[in-house]
Amino acid sequence: MHGRGEFFIRRHVHPDPDAPTVLLLHGWTASADLQFIAAYRALAERYSFVGIDHRGHGRGFRSNQQFEIADVADDAAAVLRELGIESVIALGYSMGGPVALHLARRHRDLVDGLVVQATALEWRATLRERLTWRMLPLMGVALRSWTQPRLLRRGIDYVVSDDSPYAPYRDWMTAETMRNEPRVMVQAGKALSRYDARDWASALGVPAAMLLSTEDRLVRPRKQRELARALDARIIEVPMDHLGALDMPDQFASATVELVSSVVDDVAAASVATNDSN
């Protein structure tokens, strides 16, 4: 793409040209496919969508610049404009939530509404969180170790149970995760450790909805609810852990489509109200 480089995206165009477009923004250390594969088919039945691999993640854009969440939001805006897409429902999972919020803040003309999933306003308010982020240098060492494939496979075996429909794809998940650039993973973690939208999230003023992962041990439900309150977001609770989408694919896909649909309806209602007032 002119002025930036090469981006990898997944794009589905719905047969109905009036179908809204959903922008899929994945989480830290994931890719669009890893994060949203469970929801692709359900979303495709009703919407167009674009999934982007963030810089340094998966097959995403490679850059020598420091990873910053605002830059990732600008990447997404540039991709949409390159594709000629005028507006989207921005859907962000985990780190993708901050990306979606920054996109709405920096490129308001592109964002009709927000769906956030398993994410928070900030990850730095408690001492425990700040101490956890200090372990990032050790993560960098582990990502460069010859033991990385074995450790990743063990982690994926733990997350994706034997009775999950995605269990046969564990080798692919391991290989997909290994596409990540270790240096960028550490930088992205540091960017998340600095992220704090408490001062401005409530001023975004766009229809919003949230998937709240009630068994989440990484992003505590209490923190997720704080974000939902700031966005005045409708909530759907799913009893899953942070990486539960692949272990509960039907529930995740159903909740995702329902959340998008609720935001689409709110956007349409707001448009009607605006036209009536004029």
Image (spheres, rainbow, N blue to C red):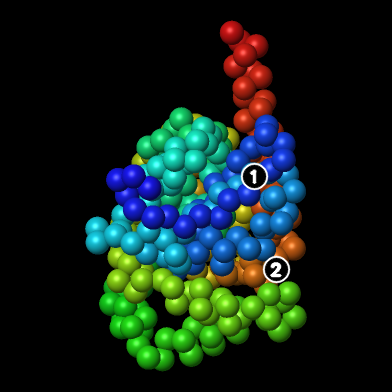
Task: Looking at the picture, tell me which residue is in the foreground, 1 or 42.
Answer: 1
Kind of residue indicated by mark 2? Met
Q: In this view, does 88 lie above or below 62?
A: above
Kind of residue indicated by mark 1? Val
First along the sequence among labels 2 and 1: 1
Task: Looking at the picture, tell me which residue is in the foreground, 123 or 159.
Answer: 159
Dot 2, how many residues are within 10 Å of its Cα: few (below 14), some (14-19), or many (20+)? many
Q: Position of residue 207 (x, y in %)?
A: 58, 35
User: Which residue is at 70% across, 68% downward?
Assistant: 248
Q: In this view, does 168 lie above or below 272?
A: below
Which tag is nearer the camera, tag 2 or tag 1?
Answer: 1
User: Which residue is at 62% across, 30% downward?
Assistant: 267
Which image quadrant: the C terminus? top right
User: Which residue is at 53% across, 70% downward?
Assistant: 217
Q: In which quarter of the image is residue 21?
A: top right
Q: Is residue 57 above or below residue 202?
A: below
Res 40 seen here: yes
Q: What element does badge 2 sit on? A: loop
Res 111 seen here: no
Residue 78 shown left or right of residue 270 in the figure: left
Q: Where is residue 81 in the image (x, y as percent from the top left)?
A: 44, 37
Q: Quadrant of residue 178?
A: bottom left
Q: Spatial distance from mark 2 to mark 1, Cα to Cα? A: 26 Å
State the residue position of label 1. 13
Q: Position of residue 102 (x, y in %)?
A: 40, 44
Residue 156 shown left or right of residue 39 in the figure: left
State the residue position of label 2. 248
User: Which residue is at 51% across, 78% downward?
Assistant: 175
Task: Looking at the picture, tell me which residue is in the foreground, 109 or 137.
Answer: 109
Q: What element does badge 1 sit on? A: loop
